[in-house]
Amino acid sequence: MMNPIYIDQNEILKRYKQPDKFTHKGIQGHALIIGGSYGKMGAVCLSSKACLKTGCGLVTVFIPKCGYDILQIAIPEVMVVTDNQEKFISDITFEITPQAIGIGPGLGLEIETQQAVYKLLKTNKIPLVIDADALNILAKNKEWFPLLHPKTIITPHPKELERLIGKWNSEEEKRTKTITFSKQYNLIIVMKGAPTRIIDGDTSYENTTGNAALATAGTGDVLTGMITSLLAQSYEPISAAILGVYLHGLTADIALPETGYQSFIASDVISNIGKAFLSLENLSK
């Protein structure tokens, strides 16, 4: 099996695009984040805020009605579209034309939600990042995988990955099974962990940033927002995944001296995205 390509400064500089100083929000990409259910609106707050902070021009969220006030108050910069159901998503319809969609954070597994995800996957042509409960829904309905467009990005943590590819007995078997799965459906798989690996068919990448501070609730939701943001800014799917994972890890490396491992939370990833970008700017000078 080929050795992984390390996601380090060199790999990032090959892919990172400097922002154009004459840009405006209309050409910086519009992302849609779909998720949330009663008691799990925080996931969409984290995801959509991270999406904005990673440079997307516009971010809309699609959530159940119960999250309307929460989102509008928590993140005034995000636009909100609601489902007709109060506590969970039952019918995903929107008038906007986003450049990328992130689906899954806080979504829940209601039967109506599963059907809504199916309907979206059947008709969707927009680049997609699938995470969390949207992955768990796919794991329950594996026959839906052929509906996904080539190079759709999925971001499973180890338990979600196991639901998709089955159990493994060694790291080597886990990697082989993930590569097989990636090739079978032509997916980019972000295997979250220490270190995070990205599998794109026979090519695999290994991230070099991040530390144990990231092992805390909500950091995965933040990563989904970051990757969706880069996808909406017209990065190729593999570059969006690579850059998102690198920046996400870098925020924890930057913050660690100030927060320590224990008190670092997902919001600290978001508040350090700016510094992570600044360190890229310095690299590319």
Image: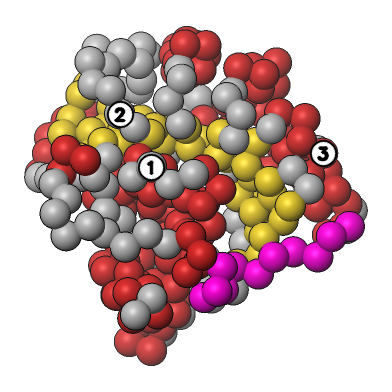
The residue indicated by pointer 2 is: 98
Q: Nearer the viewer, mark 3 or mark 1?
A: 1
Indicate yes or no whether the magenta region holds residue 9.
Answer: yes
Residue at 85% across / 48% down in the picture? 176
Give the residue type that dot 1 points to.
Ser
**Are the residues tagged 3 and 1 within 8 Å (C-beta)?**
no
The residue indicated by pointer 3 is: 180
Real-space CA distance between mark 3 and mark 1, rounded to the nearest whole angstrom: 27 Å
Give the residue type that dot 2 points to.
Pro
State the image quarter where residue 284 is shown. Answer: bottom left
Indicate yes or no whether the magenta region holds residue 267.
Answer: no
Between 81 and 185, which is closer to the camera in this rendering?
A: 185
180 vs 11: above or below? above
Q: Residues within 10 Å of mark 1 (few under 14, many from 20)?
A: some
Q: Secondary structure at mark 3?
A: helix
| Mark closer to the chain start, 2 or 3 | 2
Magenta stretch: give its range: 1-11
Q: Is residue 157 visible?
A: no
| Mark closer to the chain start, 3 or 1 | 3
Q: Secondary structure at mark 1?
A: loop
176 vs 134: above or below? below
